[in-house]
Amino acid sequence: MTKKTLIAAGLSEEQAAKIMEELESDYVPKADHDAVAEKLRLAEEKVETTEEALKKFDGVDVDDLKGQIEKLSNDLKQKDTDYQQKIADMEFNTALDAAITAAKGKNTKAIRALLDIDTLKASKNQQEDMKAAITQAAKENDYLFGDTNQQHYNPPAGGKPNTVTDMASALAEHYNK
């Protein structure tokens, strides 16, 4: 409807202008209408999605979930602590074995049995204390330390010493008599 149509219908110019003002004040451009309609549609989708998500939590005890989360967090901390302890034990054992080997220990298990492992682990200066404990064990049990190469048997007066170190030389010695 235009102003011309209203004047042609018999209204005065003033009446036609008032009607046009009223029509234009109620008029919303299509782009604005579409934008508002899209916002409304998105809001309704969000509400539906939220309601669906909340339905999944129907009957769920929030305090129970909090308890489970706290329990899992504590379990994770405990596992982390256990893991760190295992790493520390592994590093200690490796260092102790290296110290025993450096002291020319023949049997690390036997030498470990002579040492106070708990005291060494709790020590502030583990390397020095390990060396001191191993040195003390070597003084008290010298048969556990020393050269690990086996010495050949030398028979008494006039006997032939055993010089065989492998199967090939043993066969050669036996058949070359």
Image: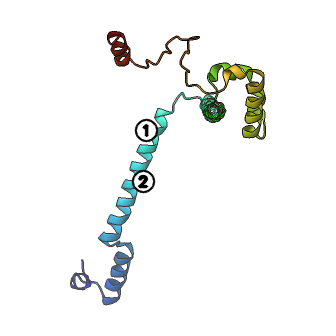
Q: Which mark is residue 113?
A: none
Q: Residue at x 74, y 24 (%)?
A: 115
Quadrant where the N terminus is found in the figure = bottom left
Q: Quadrant of residue 30?
A: bottom left
Against 154, residue 99 (above or below) is below
Disc 1 packing (10 Å; few <14; some 14–19; many ≥20): few
Residue designated by label 2: 43
Q: Is residue 111 left or right of residue 176?
A: right
- The single residue placed furthest to the front in the displayed view is 158
Residue 13: x %, y % from top left: 31, 89
Q: Quadrant of residue 40?
A: bottom left
152, above or below 99, in the image = above
Between 103 and 73, the one lying in front of the other is 103
Q: Residues within 10 Å of mark 2 (few under 14, many from 20)?
A: few
The kind of residue on which mark 2 rests is: Ala
Left or right, 108 with reference to 48: right
| Element type at mark 1 | helix
- Mark 1 = which residue? 52
Camera-side mark, 2 or 1: 1
Q: At 41% across and 44% down in the image, what residue appears?
A: 48
Q: Is residue 28 left or right of residue 128?
A: left
Whole-percent x and y of residue 61? 59, 29
Task: Name which of mark 2 and mark 1 comes first in the sequence.
Answer: 2
Foreground of the two, 162 or 90: 162
Q: Is residue 30 above or below residue 126?
A: below
The residue under the point 58% across, 11% down is 157
Q: Residue at x 56, y 21 (%)?
A: 151
| Residue 104 visible in the snapshot | yes
Q: Position of residue 135 (x, y in %)?
A: 75, 31
Q: How is the image coloured?
A: rainbow
Q: Nearer the viewer, residue 69 or 14?
A: 69
